Amino acid sequence: MKLFMAVLIFLSFSINAKETNYSIKSETLAAEFTYSVTYPYQYHEQSDRKYPLLLVLDGQNYGDVVSANASFMSHAGDIPEHVIISLTVTGRLKNYTPTDSQDWFGDGGGPEFLSFINEELMTKLNSDFRLNGNNVLWGHSAAGLFTMYALLENSPHFKAFLVNDGSLDWDKQYIYKQLTQYLKNTITKQTFLYLNSSYFNPNVPEEIKYMPPLIKALEDVKHKNLRWAYQSLMNESHSSIPMLGFIDGIRELYRGYRVPEDVLTTDIEHLQEYVTKHMHQIGAQQEIPEYAIEGLAMNQVFSTPIKAVTTLQLGLNIYPDSLPMREMLADAFVNLEQFNNAKKVIDEAIAIAKLSDPEYTQIFEQKLEDITKNNKQKH
């Protein structure tokens, strides 16, 4: 058992670790911590937009792989963009363990480390970055133990906790005992928990089978504000699980964020219904995404242009400066032989494009010329 815990606590390797110039001195811990920042695309250009925070523990080991995957998934439209903070943590046994176990020496500093996170680090991050409050805490192994502990201690700054092969058998099932107590209480804020494990296997020793009681406890008590997911990754090792575990965990957190293709082939009512269904979840779309309206309209412009007009007029109520929507709306009116309406839309588009996109101005001016010729030929 001690050997198993030693692997979980001390396993550490570097994945393209990088130097950082950011640091914070902790009065609570009398120590200095460094961290790197991965900014969302156009973070500095869009000065009024706020973002969720993704705080990666053991950033010296996992910051690069987590930030690369998060950035790729946001560009693919699966998740929103995040401000990603990769925190370098040394003294992992001390800082990540919630209790002073009789089996270890120099452990049990988790409460003080959590105070540092809650009172010092998050104060600085909220001050320095534009965060929207949908904060995510990610940890692997011993850091996964700490992430679970932060959930059970009701850390006020985080709404989502991604526990990646955490050492959840710590100190005679401390986490299981705390979880059962946590579930007895009222959960007042919307919370998401993801857990995975590479050890949920019938062939491992009995003392390692700590996950089933935790999962059963979660299954037995239903809370409106607690959404959770568990994933068994038996084909992964403790070393390989962080990459796949992060991808699956963050995707589960933002389940419903990306509008699926089959919805984009229906109508605006189904699209609105899909967004409304998921909008109560953490970080969900609160409006129909611009790309979804454009995708739906693109399927309608030539096949059912009257539906395209309805879709695009609603879309322009939400995104009044959208040039692609105006271009498609003009096409829909042309297909309906409503040339005056098409010309009106093009005139509006040219006025907007002159202020924001000169290249698009030329496209619309040519389109206006084509519509005028088409109208004359029709008459």
Image: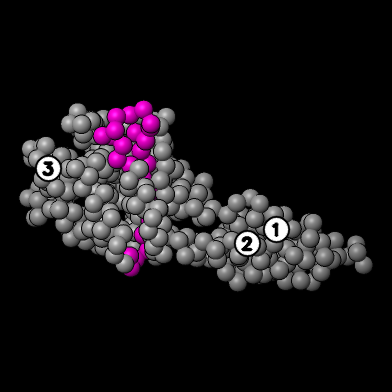
Residue 271 tag number: 2
Location of residue 275 with respect to 94 vertically, above or below: below
Look at 32% across and 46% down and name the residue there. 213
The CA span between labels 1 and 3 is 58 Å
Quarter holding the N terminus is top left
Q: Which residues are magenta?
A: 187-211
Viewer-side residue, 58 vs 169 = 169
Give the quadrant of residue 212.
top left
The CA span between labels 1 and 2 is 8 Å
Q: Which amino acid type corresponds to the residue marked 1 in the rendered image?
A: Thr
Q: Is residue 317 left or right of residue 235?
A: right
Location of residue 66 with respect to 205 vertically, above or below: below
**Earlier along the polypeptide chain: callout 2 or callout 3?**
3
**Earlier along the polypeptide chain: callout 1 or callout 2?**
1
**Disc 1 to disc 2: CB gap under 8 Å:** yes
The residue under label 3 is 101
**Earlier along the polypeptide chain: callout 1 or callout 3?**
3
Look at 9% across and 55% down and name the residue there. 28
Look at 63% across and 62% down and name the residue there. 271
